Image (cartoon, coloured by chain):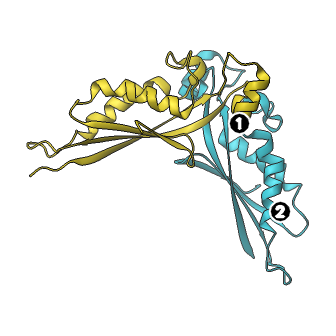
Chain colours: A cyan, B yellow
């Protein structure tokens, strides 16, 4: 089994705010991240697939195709957007990095060809904070 | 014999913004600024480097105490811009397009009065890991 990873990047605005809670409780739990008028990040996205290299090409998956799928299914929909307001895959969800990684997994997993398994979504919110999701 | 030395302090903040010229119609803003003009804002992790050049003080060996410089940047820059919407939440960009260029100029102006005038100063601001600006050039 070989693991193949593609790096992509995007940026977006968001806020962490639970509409079921009071303003004060949101401030208490989320602090500055609850700022009413949003803040934002440069996100770095690592998508890892796994499989056996093809005897014909030597590839687990054509990485250019993988990049195109990520761009069409994810980047095009969230880059330079407001995650809370503009992004269909985050509608009704808290816009944490955890939930965004899960949404990106769900968005991509149906577009990979048979024989190519999605292994991990690793998503950096800042150079010092990242999450990993393995579809479990 | 004391020589000139450059010292650097790195800090970071994140913010939402959009690029928009209110004197133009939406079509012109879209043509010039593209996705950066989208109405609901987007955002960045900004990395700021402050460079000071001068001769080390003969008593301390410092060009400037880095702890003092770090505290200054946190007080003047981080507290103003971190986790904010630059267009909506800050005085500095009420009437100024928050491009990386303009943010660097604003940061320079905010810090300069608090830095020893004998030291040369330059700010470098990363908007993304691939886009950065320096002021003064």
Residue B46 in sight from this viewpoint: yes
Q: Residue at x 77, y 55 (%)?
A: A135
Q: Looking at the image, which residue sits at the far right?
A: A114
Residue B89 position (above or below residue B124): above
On what subunit does the disc labeled 1 rest?
A
- The answer to which of B27 and A88 lies nearer the viewer is B27
SS at circle 2: helix
- The answer to which of B20 and A18 lies nearer the viewer is B20
Q: Residues within 10 Å of mark 1 (few under 14, many from 20)?
A: many
How far across and down, in percent of the image, does residue A96 sit? Answer: 67, 37
How far across and down, in percent of the image, does residue A82 sit? Answer: 72, 31
Residue A123 located left or right of residue A61: left
How far across and down, in percent of the image, does residue B124 sit? Answer: 44, 41
Q: Which residue is mark 1?
A: A80
State which quadrant residue A22 falls in. Answer: top right
Q: Residues within 10 Å of mark 2 (few under 14, many from 20)?
A: few
Q: Earlier in the sequence, mark 1 or mark 2?
A: 2
Q: Which residue is mark 2?
A: A65
Give the number of the disc on residue B14. Answer: none
Q: Looking at the image, which residue sits at the far bottom?
A: A55
Alpha carbon distance from label 1 to label 2: 23 Å
Residue A124 position (above or below residue B74): below
Q: Residue at x 38, y 24 (%)?
A: B110
Residue A81 in sight from this viewpoint: no
State which quadrant residue B64 falls in. Answer: top left
State which quadrant residue B109 falls in. Answer: top left
């Amino acid at each position: 089994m070989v693991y193949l990873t593609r790096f992509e990047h995007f940026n977006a605005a968001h806020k962490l705010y639970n509409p079921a809670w009071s303003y004060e409780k949101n401030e208490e739990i989320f602090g500055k991240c609850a700022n009413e008028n949003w803040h934002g990040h440069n996100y770095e996205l690592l998508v890892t697939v796994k499989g056996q290299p093809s005897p014909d090409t030597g590839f687990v998956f054509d990485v250019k195709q993988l990049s195109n799928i990520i761009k069409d299914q994810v980047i095009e929909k969230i880059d330079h957007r407001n995650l809370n307001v503009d992004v269909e895959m985050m509608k009704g969800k808290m816009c944490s990095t955890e939930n965004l990684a899960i949404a990106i997994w769900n968005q991509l997993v149906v577009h990979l060809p048979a024989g190519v398994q999605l292994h991990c979504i690793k998503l950096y919110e800042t150079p010092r904070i990242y999450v990993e999701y393995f579809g479990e | 014999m004391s020589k000139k030395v450059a010292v650097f302090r790195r800090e970071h903040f994140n913010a939402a913004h959009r690029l928009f010229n209110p004197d133009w119609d939406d079509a012109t803003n879209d043509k010039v600024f593209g996705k950066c003009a989208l109405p609901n804002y987007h955002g960045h992790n900004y990395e700021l480097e402050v460079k000071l050049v001068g001769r080390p003080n003969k008593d301390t060996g410092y060009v400037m105490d880095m702890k003092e410089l770090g505290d200054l940047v946190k007080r003047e820059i981080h507290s103003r811009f971190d986790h904010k919407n630059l267009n909506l939440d800050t005085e500095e960009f009420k009437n100024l397009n928050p491009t990386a260029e303009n943010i660097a100029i604003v940061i320079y102006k905010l810090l300069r009065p608090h830095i020893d005038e004998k030291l040369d100063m330059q700010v470098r601001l990363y908007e993304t890991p691939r886009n950065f600006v320096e002021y003064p050039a």
